[in-house]
Amino acid sequence: MSTRRFASLAIFGLLGCGEPPPPSMYSLTLRVQSDTRAMPGAVVLYRDRELGRTDNNGTFVLQTPGVEGTTLNLTVRCPAGFSPASQEVPVMLRSTLSLGDGGRNDGTETTVRCPPSQRIAAVVVRTPGHPNLPIVYNGREITRTDLQGVAHMLFRVNTGEPIALRIDTAQQPLLRPQNPTLTLTTRDLDDVYVATQNFSEEAAPRQVVRSVSRPAGPQRIPSRRTWMPF
């Protein structure tokens, strides 16, 4: 039994057993996407009964009898790794006629989104003129700035999760500010984040050279003795 036929029988049975079927048939099309990509394998349910799954094009087509204007509350369950886990999708039964193909009834279409529950964040940290600075994340060093003062990192984060990076200046104590923290707020998409931290350098303390002082007053010159033979 095909998915489309099974979906039609399931809806009809739930709308009311034993009653004569309504004369009109309605076509419903669900398109499930993750960002701009089709999402295959999303489960479509009606009253907790599975009607079928989206195909490789992210499409699920339902044929059902009903009454014009009736709303069916379908549920779309996103695959693992995508959110939300499930969402209710109200779909109204209505007739829509195509201008071409002799006025064909194309039914209604609804688009549902299952975005990834985690995002890729590419982070670039710039410390102009200051190479070899450790970048610390969650208490451990993960990389260092290169000779141009640039560090590249990749993170997989939950949507909206902040990324806090600390630049360790312990080995260069004259830099100001010391050990700054850069906090990046991620967005609901795979994206690149660039953060720049400028430093000033404090002058090194002068070393005071102390000279050995000599006592004041005339200095005693030791006498020179000449020995004469008798």
Image (cartoon, rainbow, N blue to C red):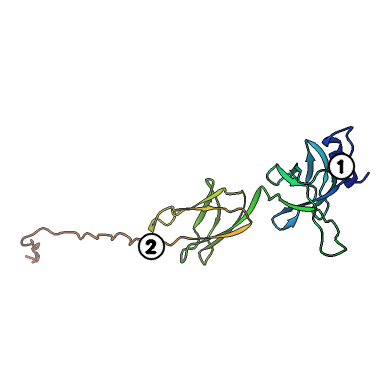
Residue 87 image point, x, y percent: 70, 43
Q: Nearer the viewer, residue 46 or 21?
A: 21
Q: Earlier in the sequence, mark 2 or mark 1?
A: 1
The answer to whether 186 is drawn above or below residue 86 in the figure is below
Q: Quadrant of residue 224?
A: bottom left
- Residues at marks 2 and 1, CA–CA distance in whole angstroms: 79 Å
Return the x and y of residue 42 as percentages of the image width and height: 78, 46
Q: Which mark is residue 216?
A: none
Residue beneath disc 2 = 200
Query: In this rendering, would 226 be left or right of 186?
Result: left
Q: Nearer the viewer, residue 195 or 16?
A: 16
Per the image, the residue denoted by label 1 is 22
Q: Is residue 126 above or below residue 76?
A: below
- Residue at 20% across, 61% down: 211
Q: Is residue 20 left or right of residue 202?
A: right
Q: Position of residue 178 (x, y in %)?
A: 40, 54
Q: Residue furthest top?
A: 18
- Tell me the mark number nearer the camera, choosing from 2 and 1: 1
Tell me the amino acid under the disc marked 2: Ser
Residue shown at the point (33%, 60%) measured from the top left: 204
